[in-house]
Image (cartoon, helix red, strand yellow):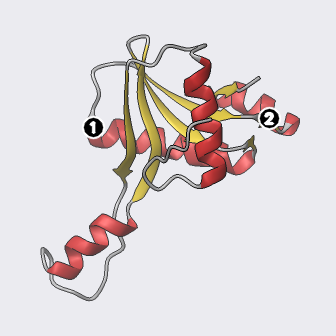
């Protein structure tokens, strides 16, 4: 495996994402990493000040990957194991992505992982979260 990095992705997540890309099982047309969504932390500083801009850059939520796949936007959370907290993250991120960017194409919340906690499969199906597990 080539030593690669992706913005703000932990090393275990990087390994999962690299395996997914190298598999070429699902063709990915375009990717965007570390996509900021949501509101920044509000402090006791003036609007548009340096502190305000720094807070906006550091404290907004970050989508691991947004990918264009088969004319859809996949809002992707990358985790070694797809567990309950990944579902919450990706559902919230997809909603914020749609609200902020108003994409013209359909969006899907997707978890890319190596393994899946069996307890979350039914919840993923009910919520429309796609789980892609590396084999």
Q: Residue 71: name its quadrant.
A: top left
Q: Where's residue 30, x and y in %?
A: 36, 24
The residue identified by callout 1 is: 101
Q: Is residue 70 left or right of residue 83?
A: left
Q: Regarding mark 1 in the picture, which secondary structure is present there? A: helix
As drawn, 46 above or below 17 = below
Residue at 20% in and 71% down = 53
Q: Where's residue 104, x and y in %?
A: 27, 21
The residue identified by callout 2 is: 116
Pick out the residue farthest to the bottom: 44
Q: Is residue 58 left or right of residue 83?
A: left
Q: Residues within 10 Å of mark 2 (few under 14, many from 20)?
A: many
Q: Residue 3: name its quadrant.
A: top right
Give the number of marks.
Answer: 2
Instruction: Give the position of the N terminus as an image quadrant.
Output: top right
Residue at 62% in and 19% down = 23
Q: Where's residue 26, x and y in %?
A: 56, 14
As drawn, 92 above or below 101 = below
Q: Regarding mark 2 in the picture, which secondary structure is present there? A: strand
Q: Nearer the viewer, residue 82 or 32?
A: 32
Pick out the residue farthest to the left: 48
Q: Residue 81: name its quadrant.
A: top right
Instruction: Give the position of the C terminus as an image quadrant.
Output: top right
Residue at 26% in and 74% down = 54
Q: Is residue 53 left or right of residue 28?
A: left
Q: Nearer the viewer, residue 15 or 59?
A: 15
Q: Nearer the viewer, residue 71 or 13?
A: 13
Q: Residues within 10 Å of mark 1 (few under 14, many from 20)?
A: few
Front position among marks 1 and 2: 2
N-terminal-most mark, 1 or 2: 1
Residue at 80% in and 35% down = 116
Q: Are marks 1 and 2 in contact (CB under 8 Å)?
A: no
């Amino acid at each position: 495996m080539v030593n690669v990095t992706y913005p703000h992705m932990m090393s275990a997540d990087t390994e999962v994402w690299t395996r997914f890309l190298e598999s070429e099982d699902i063709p990915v047309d375009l990717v965007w990493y570390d996509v900021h969504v949501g509101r920044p932390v509000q402090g006791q500083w003036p609007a548009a000040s340096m502190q305000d801009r720094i807070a906006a850059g550091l404290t907004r939520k970050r989508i691991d990957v947004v990918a264009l796949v088969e004319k859809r936007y996949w809002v992707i959370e990358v985790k070694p194991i797809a567990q309950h907290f990944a579902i919450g993250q990706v559902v919230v991120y997809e909603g914020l992505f749609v609200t902020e960017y108003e994409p013209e194409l359909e969006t899907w919340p997707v978890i890319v992982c190596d393994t899946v906690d069996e307890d979350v499969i039914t919840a993923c199906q009910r919520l429309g979260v796609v789980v892609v597990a590396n084999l």
